[in-house]
Image (cartoon, rainbow, N blue to C red):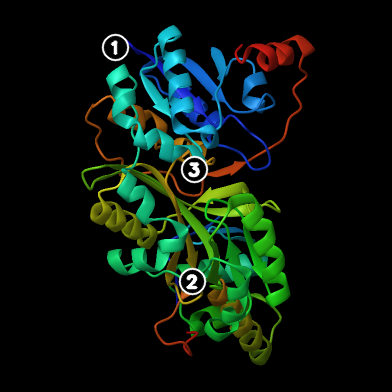
């Protein structure tokens, strides 16, 4: 069988202690026996480790942050596309997704395929709308309160028992045991991610996650549940294990069916001692631990690329449970010239 | 009492629960007990097997057995329909 020749652009090459999914997504794609790939790495910062990993990307381009404006970002992607025709683009940052979703048609007209959730799917699962989301789709979620200003912090004690979780709209979460700690977390989060800051009821239990892929027609193409075994101080998984948990799969399939979810996703759930599951967050993209799913038998990035190209993909029903991943750090020695090239030319 | 379907017991005493992701090490006695429970033996059978094999009195066996059962139940290795039933 001849391999399908593809050029795929991927963002999120920041394989730091808070890793973007770019590197594992590329690794997953390269594990596919069906593709003959040319990989274009799209980076925001000159020190994203993926730039310097030998054999990972064929070409790297720097792109402007979405905060400078969607048009600048898309213009730059199109400029890159004129030089290195991109078949499929896989964005991996929450903060850039909006720009790429909004410009999905424009990108497609240029010949760049994506497979992203719709704007409605993306926006209704926002953390500050989680209670409405839970009610609409029949899934348990923790009670929450959106804080638009510090003055509202006093309302917390009327509605919640401490501790509570204090969360940013996009990233960051802190546990707070009193009003003072909420204030500190509020200031940290609001200065970085803006408002609202979300106060969430603390649900005691074990955090479990599901990586999944929806085809946009209500079908779950892939789903693998995982429990973090080793968690960094940023709350990121440094080790994890796949689980055989039918209830988690049922929750995922039901949610994808009801929302007609399109694209990759990660469900973050808390399993209580009573065996109840609370949805605490939906990440509308492939998570950084995606390679565990590949190791367990479901190559989600490969399936996503096929869906983006309009190919039919049969649902993957099985995976190996008890498969583990353990992350590690590794120092790459880099010649100054390489850093200089990306810093000065914006490409390498 | 029944060992849940998701639990895998290795001969070296490594017990893995694929539903929760938890793993445990049990000592040889714990392994023997876990295997006997997994084979579906009831309390009286396990007791007589242990009393026959080891220098042990009834009371000590019962105390240790219940303690062990409570522990593995807590870790969701076993399920019981009646929470007071260890047999």
Disc 3 crowd rating (10 Å Cα; few below 14, some 14-19, many 20+) is: some
- The kind of secondary structure element at disc 3 is helix
Along the line of sight, the residue nearer the viewer: A276 or B87: A276
- The kind of secondary structure element at disc 2 is strand
Give the alpha-carbon distance from disc 1 to disc 2, as whole Å.
Answer: 53 Å
Q: What chain does mark 3 sit on?
A: A
Along the line of sight, the residue nearer the viewer: A95 or A218: A95
Q: Which residue is mark 2?
A: A144
Residue at image location 48% in from the left, 20% down from the top: A76
Decide if residue A171 is in sight here: yes
Along the line of sight, the residue nearer the viewer: A111 or A321: A111
Residue A84 appears at what percent x and percent y?
Answer: 44, 10
Using the rendered view, name the quadrant where residue A325 is placed: top right
Along the line of sight, the residue nearer the viewer: A23 or A42: A42
Earlier residue among tags 1 and 2 = 1
- Quadrant containing the N terminus of chain A is top left
Q: Relative to residue A252, is residue B80 drawn left or right?
A: right
Using the rendered view, name the quadrant where residue A106 is placed: top left
Mark 1 or 3, closer to the camera: 3
Give the alpha-carbon distance from disc 2 to disc 3, as whole Å.
Answer: 21 Å
Residue A318 appears at what percent x and percent y?
Answer: 34, 44
Disc 1 crowd rating (10 Å Cα; few below 14, some 14-19, many 20+) is: few
- The kind of secondary structure element at disc 1 is loop
- Quadrant containing the C terminus of chain A is top right
Residue A107 appears at what percent x and percent y?
Answer: 34, 24
Q: Which residue is mark 3?
A: A94
What count of labels does the image hold?
Answer: 3
Q: Relative to residue A332, is residue A48 drawn left or right?
A: left
Q: Which residue is mark 1?
A: A1
């Amino acid at each position: 069988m001849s391999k399908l020749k593809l050029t795929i652009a991927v963002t999120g090459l920041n394989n730091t202690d808070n890793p973007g999914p770019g590197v594992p997504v590329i690794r997953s794609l390269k594990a596919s026996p069906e593709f003959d790939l040319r990989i274009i790495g799209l980076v925001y910062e000159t020190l994203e480790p993926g730039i310097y990993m030998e054999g990972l990307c064929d070409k790297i381009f720097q792109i402007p942050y979405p905060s400078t404006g969607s048009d600048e970002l898309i213009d730059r992607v199109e400029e890159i596309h004129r030089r290195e025709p991109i078949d499929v683009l896989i964005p991996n940052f929450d903060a850039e997704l909006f720009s790429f979703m909004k410009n999905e048609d424009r990108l497609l007209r240029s010949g760049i395929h994506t497979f992203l959730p719709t704007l409605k799917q993306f926006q209704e699962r926002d953390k500050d709308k989680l209670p409405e989301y839970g009610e609409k789709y029949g899934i348990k979620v923790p009670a929450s309160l959106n804080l638009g200003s510090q003055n509202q912090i006093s309302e917390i004690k009327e509605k919640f028992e401490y501790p509570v979780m204090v969360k940013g709209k996009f990233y960051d979460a802190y546990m707070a045991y009193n009003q003072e700690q909420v204030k500190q977390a509020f200031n940290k989060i609001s200065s970085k991610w803006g408002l609202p800051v979300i106060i969430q009821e603390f649900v005691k239990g074990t955090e479990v996650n599901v990586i999944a892929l929806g085809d946009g027609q209500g079908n779950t193409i892939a789903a693998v549940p995982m429990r973090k075994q080793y968690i960094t101080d940023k709350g990121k998984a440094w080790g994890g294990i796949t689980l055989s948990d039918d209830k988690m799969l049922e929750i995922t399939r039901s949610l994808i069916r009801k929302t007609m979810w399109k694209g990759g996703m990660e469900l973050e759930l808390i399993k209580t001692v009573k065996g109840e599951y609370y949805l605490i967050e939906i990440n509308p993209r492939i998570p950084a631990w995606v390679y565990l799913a590949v190791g367990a038998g479901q190559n989600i990035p490969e399936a996503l690329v096929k869906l983006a190209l309009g190919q039919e993909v049969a649902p993957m029903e099985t995976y190996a449970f008890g498969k583990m991943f353990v992350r590690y750090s590794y120092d790459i020695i880099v010649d100054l010239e390489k850093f200089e090239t990306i810093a000065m030319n914006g490409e390498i | 009492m029944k060992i849940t379907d998701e639990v895998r017991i290795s001969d070296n005493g490594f017990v893995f629960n694929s539903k929760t992701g938890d793993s445990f090490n049990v000592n040889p006695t714990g392994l023997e007990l876990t295997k006997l429970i997994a084979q579906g033996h009831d309390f009286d059978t396990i007791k007589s097997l242990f009393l026959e094999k080891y220098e042990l009195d009834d009371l000590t066996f019962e105390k240790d057995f219940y303690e062990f059962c409570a522990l593995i139940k807590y870790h969701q290795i076993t399920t019981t329909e009646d929470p007071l039933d260890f047999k």
